[in-house]
Amino acid sequence: MKIDLDEARRVAALAHLQFDDAGLERMAAEMTKILTYIDQLSEVDVEGFEERDATVTPFRADEPHASLDRELVARNAPSWRDGLFVVPKVIEGNAGVATMGAAASTPPSREAGDE
C-alpha cells in the first residue's frame, strides 16, 4: 500500500505534527515501508502453529516473597546515603545529589574503602 502526500498530511494533522514538504515525503515513504512489511507478514505460512490463549501470561506467578536485606544492599551499593541509593545527577535543575528509593530503615553508612 502506497501512502501519498495527502494521506501523510492527514496523519500528521491527526497526530498534531507539522512537517515541511520534504518531511511529509519522508514520512509517506516510511509509512509505505511499514505497511509493505505488514503486508509481507500476512503472507507468512503459519500452518501448524497454534494461537496462544490471550489470558495466559508467560510471566512468573505474582506471589509475595521476602524483601532484599537492606544491609546487604547498602554494602553492595556503589553509593548509599541515609538509606537511599545515591545516583549521579543527569538533569539540570535543583542543586544537590539525586537519590533513588525510600528508606524503611537506615542501614549503616558505607565508608570509603569498605568492600
Image: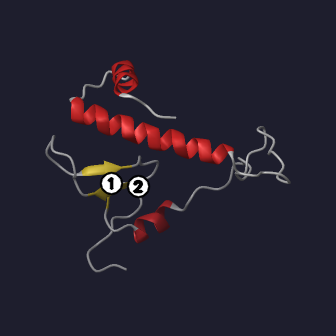
Looking at the image, which residue is at 40% across and 23% down? 7
Above-or-below relation of 18 to 55: above
Q: Quadrant of residue 13?
A: top left
Q: Residues within 10 Å of mark 2 (few under 14, many from 20)?
A: some
- The way the protein has been coloured in the rendering is secondary structure
Q: CA distance from mark 1 to mark 2?
A: 6 Å
Q: Residues within 10 Å of mark 1 (few under 14, many from 20)?
A: some
| Residue of label 2 | 106
- Name which residue type carries label 2: Thr
Q: Earlier in the sequence, mark 1 or mark 2?
A: 1
Q: Quadrant of residue 108?
A: bottom left
* Contact check, label 1 and label 2, Cβ < 8 Å: yes
| Residue 9 tag number | none
Residue 36 image position (x, y, % from top left): 53, 43
Residue 52 image position (x, y, % from top left): 80, 45
Secondary structure of residue under mark 1 = loop
Secondary structure of residue under mark 2 = loop
Q: Quadrant of residue 23?
A: top left
Residue 35 image position (x, y, % from top left): 52, 39
Residue 99 image position (x, y, % from top left): 31, 50
Left/right placement of residue 56 relative to residue 105 reads: right
| Residue of label 1 | 82
Left/right placement of residue 43 relative to residue 94 reads: right
Looking at the image, which residue is at 33% across and 23% down? 9
Camera-side residue of 61 and 15: 15
